[in-house]
Amino acid sequence: MKKLLLFIIAMAVSGIAFAQSYNTELNTLGQYVQRMYLNEPFQGARVISDVDKCYLISVVAERPSDNEYATQRKAEVKGLRYANEFLNGSQISSNSISYTKETSDGYSYEEIEDFIEARSMGYVQTMQIISTFTDEQGKKVFVFCKQLPMPEQPKNKKNKRRR
């Protein structure tokens, strides 16, 4: 009975000790993207490749609001949209309508309405958040990541001399 109890306690302690581990590779990648952003701010999706790994990175900057959950959810949806447009492309169309109206005292003014529509095919499922920080303008920047399959490298063919 004591052995069983000791075994259960040992398993519980080891589970607690290793429960909150983090991926040092993604931590380093998040710091790299943060330095890139602070050097020259950007938003959107990019591909960053290492020697043996390839990542799709999506960066979103949002003004913080009272509701932290809503801000994070909005950033997540934008990040997925940036990634989807990067991978699958999008079709954008716009229309402008111009109206000239007159007031009762004889003055005329112009109103312009712009309609912009974007369509995209495909779907990017989930992206992992790897970093959040605040930039100089006070915006909260979210960095999302998804590992991509490594592109195949062309095989080196040696030039063989024909006889």
Image: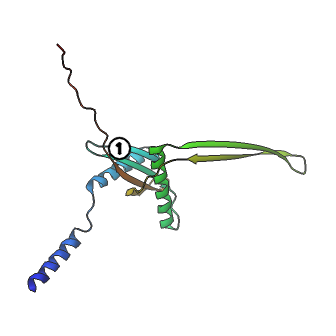
108 in relation to 67, above or below: above
Residue at the image point whose x is 49% and y is 46% from the top: 85
* Secondary structure of the residue carrying numbered label 1: strand
Q: Taking the image as drawn, is residue 53 in sight?
A: yes
Residue at the image point whose x is 79% and y is 45% from the top: 99
**Residue with the most extreme front position:** 163
Mark 1 — residue? 48
Indicate the quadrant containing the N terminus: top left, top right, bottom left or bottom right: bottom left
Q: Could you tell whether 92 is left or right of 127 in the image?
A: right
The x, y position of residue 65, in whole percent, is 53, 64
Q: Could you tell me the amino acid type at mark 1?
A: Ile
Residue at the image point whose x is 25% and y is 68% from the top: 19
Viewer-nearest residue: 33 or 25: 25
The x, y position of residue 49, in whole percent, is 32, 43
**Residue with the most extreme top position:** 163
The x, y position of residue 11, in whole percent, is 17, 75
- Label 1 packing within 10 angstroms: few (<14), some (14-19), many (20+): some
Residue at the image point whose x is 16% and y is 79% from the top: 8
Q: Taking the image as drawn, is residue 138 in sight?
A: no
The x, y position of residue 35, in whole percent, is 37, 48
**Residue with the most extreme bottom position:** 1
Q: Could you tell whether 106 is left or right of 20 in the image?
A: right
Viewer-nearest residue: 26 or 77: 77
